[in-house]
Image (tube, helix red, strand yellow):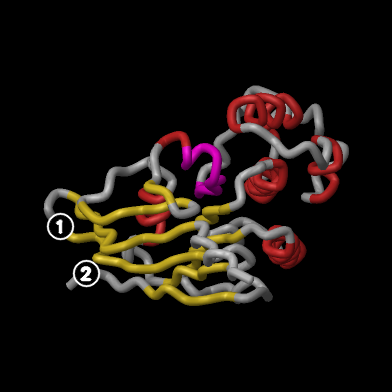
Amino acid sequence: MTAPPPRSPLLEARQLRFSRNDIPVFGPLDFSVDAGEALLVQGDNGAGKTTLLRVLAGLLRPEGGQVRLQGQPADPLSRAQSTAYLGHLPGAKADLGVRENLDYLCGLHGRRATPSLEEALDVVGLGGFEDALVRQLSAGQKKRLSLARLWLSPAPLWLMDEPYANLDLEGIELVNRMVRAHLDEGGASLVTTHGAYAAPPVRTRLLALEKPT
């Protein structure tokens, strides 16, 4: 009986590097993220954690190297289908309501068949805020809205930049539960942190970034 071919990593980077104004920010980096795994990216402020995630999400062009998603070279279509990016900013329209924002974002990026929008808002603790304008939300509530969008995403790879920021202890545990459930379903996560918070309680590998000298 012939063994099945090995599965490609959800994300693979080879010799990936980035510079700004001819000053190196990170790299060259070699790493991969498999299904069912979280890669924790640690480093001090200025080490390039956010820049790395923006490069992986396709928001910045690398100076060199290659990114592959599910075994294929990354392009705009594969990034849109395979990755969901959680950045520092909420990415929501301030003068639209919570439900309106989720409807719009799901229409733009796609969504899973389940859960419903209402169920996703309940999961992140925003049940009852469906009609609240985003500009009326606290920083923590805006982060929870971003987490609801992530929870609805069909993308197998979550790119999470400082996901614990602006969250209380209950919110931190929420992120951990979401990451654990996502990995249990065969997804993967890349999580940046400056070290102030513990890693999600899942199968985790570490990628340490240092400020260029």
Residue 135 in view:
no
In the foreground, 14 or 178: 14
- Residue holding disc 1: 23
Q: Position of residue 193 (x, y in %)?
A: 50, 67
Task: Please indicate whether residue 49 sits to the left or right of residue 129 in the image.
Answer: left
Q: Is residue 144 above or below residue 47?
A: above
In the foreground, 209 or 165: 209
Q: Is residue 96 above or below residue 19?
A: above
Residue 64 in view:
yes
Queried whether the magenta region covers residue 129, the answer comes back as no
Please identify the quarter of the rendering in which residue 15 is found. bottom left
Q: Position of residue 128 (x, y in %)?
A: 87, 37
Amino acid marked by disc 2: Pro
Q: Please tell me which residue is depicted at 54% across the width and 63% down the height of the picture.
A: 7
Q: Which residues are magenta?
A: 78-88
Task: Please indicate whether residue 211 sits to the left or right of residue 117 in the image.
Answer: left
Q: Position of residue 151 (x, y in %)?
A: 71, 47
Please identify the quarter of the rendering in which residue 103 is found. top right
Q: Please tell me which residue is depicted at 38% across the width and 41% down the height of the picture.
A: 59
Which disc, if any, is residue 212? 2
Disc 1 and disc 2 in contact, CB within 8 angstroms: yes
